[in-house]
Image (cartoon, rainbow, N blue to C red):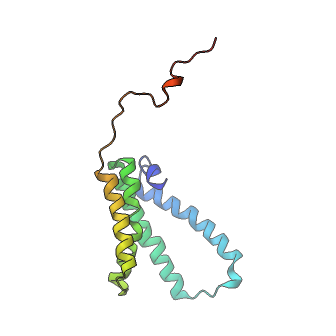
Amino acid sequence: MYSLRGKGAGDPTRVTAGNFLRASLFTALLSMLLHSNSNPDSAGIVYATASGAITSGLGYAIWYSVVPALKATNAASVQLSVPVIAALGGIIILGESVTTRFVLASLAILGGIALVILSKPQRNTGRNVFPAVVNERRD
């Protein structure tokens, strides 16, 4: 849905900032309700802000600027690669292990995306799927 709305969203930075502002209001309200169960510290708040507002915000702004150039199915499919990219970031930046599960899941996700992007669209042959109800009129 995010990709489809992004096709006609306008200025990617403004739209992303608005989305993040609305999400922040909801998150702040939820945090206040659940505050008794948390123990925030300043470093955690800074890291959360940096990862959420800055990196994610920039990523979505870039995505919104690219998505109008893509077909809707390709945009929606490519967006499914985000978990693979995030896990790869964990491997590269945090030194996480490359596991068989990661490799197989990445191959399945990226393979599915490739199938969607590389498949040829089916042509409409003009045949009605339900021929018995074509032009049926009751007087």
Q: Is residue 117 above or below residue 60?
A: above
In this orientation, which residue lies closer to the viewer: 29 or 91?
A: 91
User: Residue 133, image x and y in percent?
Assistant: 54, 24
Question: Does residue 25 appear to the left or right of 96 in the view shown?
Answer: right
Q: Is residue 15 above or below residue 133?
A: below
**Residue in the picture at 39% in, 48% down:** 72
In this orientation, which residue lies closer to the viewer: 48 or 106?
A: 106
Image quarter where the C terminus lies is: top right
Q: Is residue 120 above or below residue 49?
A: above
**In the orientation shown, which residue stands out farthest toward the front?**
132
Number of labelled discs?
Answer: 0
- Rendering quarter of residue 63: bottom left
- Rendering quarter of residue 30: bottom right
User: Residue 33, image x and y in percent?
Assistant: 71, 75
Question: Does residue 126 appear to the left or right of 24 in the view shown?
Answer: left
In this orientation, which residue lies closer to the viewer: 135 or 35?
A: 135
User: Residue 136, image x and y in percent?
Assistant: 55, 18
User: Residue 23, image x and y in percent?
Assistant: 57, 64
In this orientation, which residue lies closer to the viewer: 5 or 112?
A: 112
Question: Does residue 102 appear to the left or right of 22 in the view shown?
Answer: left
**Residue in the picture at 28% in, 52% down:** 118
**Residue in the picture at 45% in, 57% down:** 14
**Residue in the picture at 65% in, 75% down:** 31
